């Protein structure tokens, strides 16, 4: 047996094996490898997209939270302004009501004063008439008249 022939036979067998592997075995392995490579690339791309979406969602939620806080601050500010306005209106109404009560009380006081004056006038006129009767009943003495007038003045 010749080493060269064996070597040549092994080379031919190796060439046939390589041809057979490249024709029938290698393509399915390459397809499987390409499919796995594609799945890994898709997974990495999906992870990158998910991370980007997460960042966008966080930014969006932060922005919405900021807007909500601003809106809440605006609503609180409006409520405070409205409360102050209501307090001012209540003060104004209280002043108007107080003035109305004061005016009513002053009118009532004025009526009471007028009644008292009328009663006083009636009493003075009664006393004057009574004094005139006493003067006319008594003698027309100057000293008696002065004494009578002093009594009337003390009664008033």
Image (spheres, grey):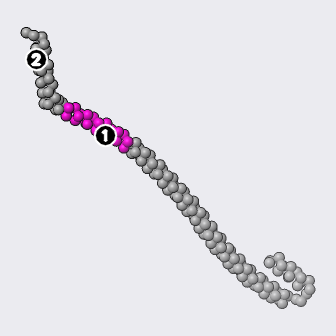
Tell me if residue 143 is in the magenta stretch: no
Q: In the rendered structure, which segment of residues is drawn in magenta?
A: 30-53
Tag 2, which secondary structure? helix
Residues packed near mark 1 inside 10 Å, few (<14), some (14 to 19) or many (20 plus): few
Q: Mark 2 points at which residue?
A: 9
Whether pointer 2 and pointer 1 mark residues with C-beta atoms closer than 8 Å, the reply is no
Look at the picture and state if 92 lies above or below 7: below
Residue 83 shows up from this direction? no
For this orientation, the residue located farthest to the right is: 142
Query: Which quadrant of the structure image shows residue 124?
Result: bottom right
Residue at 64%, 74% (x, y): give it. 104
- Residue sitting nearer the eye, 17 or 75: 17
**From the viewer's perspective, is the residue at label 2 or at label 1 nearer?**
2
Residue 113 % position (x, y): 71, 77
Give residue 91's mark.
Answer: none
Report the side of 89 relative to 125 (left or right): left
What residue is shown at x 91% (from left), y 83% (from top)? Answer: 143
Which mark is on residue 46?
Answer: 1
């Amino acid at each position: 047996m010749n080493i060269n022939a064996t070597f040549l036979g092994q080379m031919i067998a190796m060439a046939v094996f390589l041809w057979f592997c490249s024709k029938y075995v290698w393509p399915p392995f390459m397809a499987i490898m390409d499919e796995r490579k594609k799945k890994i690339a898709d997974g990495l791309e999906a992870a990158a997209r998910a991370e980007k979406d997460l960042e966008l969602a966080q930014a969006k939620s932060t922005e919405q939270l900021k807007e909500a806080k601003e809106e809440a601050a605006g609503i609180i500010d409006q409520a405070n302004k409205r409360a102050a306005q209501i307090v001012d209106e209540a003060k104004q109404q209280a002043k108007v009501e107080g003035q109305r009560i004061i005016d009513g009380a002053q009118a009532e006081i004025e009526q009471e004063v007028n009644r008292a004056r009328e009663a006083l006038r009636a009493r003075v006129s009664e006393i004057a008439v009574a004094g005139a009767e006493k003067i006319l009943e008594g003698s027309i003495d100057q000293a008696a008249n002065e004494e009578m007038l002093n009594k009337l003045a003390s009664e008033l």
